[in-house]
Amino acid sequence: MSARRLLTSLLTALLPLLAGAQAVQLGGLAGGKALLIVGNEPPRFIGPGQSVGEAKLLQVLPDGAVVEVGGERLTLRLGQSPLTQATAPARGNGSRVVLEAGHGGHFISAGQINGKHVEFLVDTGATVVAMGRADAERIGIKPEVGRPVQMNTANGVVIGHQVQLASVKLGDATLYDVPAVVMPTPMSHVLLGNSFLSRFQLKRENTTLTLEKRY
């Protein structure tokens, strides 16, 4: 490996550390906004000039975003983040799911949508399950058959598509007929929003999140 390639690899690996005390991830892009996941903060779509935690969004690029954290200006690309590996798999029985927090305190776990494997990021601030178009097509969902919905109008209207998921599985718990939205742009994870989470009682203790199914 050349010295330049080695330096590039090291800088990529150190990117979360250079971002100060809070690790920063670019989770998706839509309508001139960026989905930032910062430290223990909930994932949020924000526009240039807005902030999540210590990270301020400066510019949205076609495949990335420029942020400022602790006086450092950084360019984040989709896929370059501290959350590229899932946490320990969800465990429990059909009515109870236990998740362990991963890097930055976020709950990430492998799961299934319509029988196809996906990687979930728990987002209690999201109204519904949300995924990028690439994930939807891989699962076999055709977004264009869903009802168009307007999203993120602050920096231009983004048209997503509301769809119905036949099944969503996390751990041993499976729910059916779950509303979701397909975003027109890539996302690093499928956001597990309240159209799934609201059917459970959530309890967090330190780094553990327990979901108890409501009856």
Image (cartoon, helix red, strand yellow):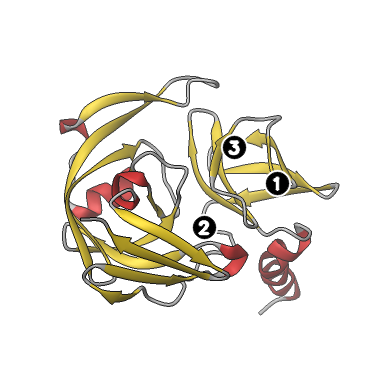
Q: CA distance from mark 1 to mark 3?
A: 21 Å
As helix, strand or loop, the secondary structure at mark 3 comes to: loop
Percent across and percent down for residue 25 are 59, 54
Res 130 visible: no
Front in this rendered view, residue 208 or 58: 208
Say whether disc 3 or disc 2 marks the residue closer to the N-terminus. 3
Identity of the residue drawn at 30% across and 44% down:
195
Q: Please give the residue where the numbered disc 2 appears in the rendered image.
A: 79
Q: At label 3, which amino acid type do we have? A: Leu
- Which quadrant of the figure contains the C terminus? bottom left
Residue 94 visible, this angle: yes
Q: Residue at x 23, y 72 (%)?
A: 172
Label 3 vs label 2: CA separation? 14 Å
Query: Helix, strand, or loop for circle 1?
Result: loop
- Crowd tier of the residue under label 3, counting other residues whose Cα lies within 10 Å: few below 14, some 14–19, many 20 or above: some
Q: Is residue 86 above or below residue 166?
A: below
* Amino acid type, mark 2: Gly
Q: Which residue is mark 1?
A: 53
Q: What is the crowding at mark 1: few (fewer than 14 residues within 10 Å), some, or many (at least 20)?
A: some
Tag 3 residue: 61
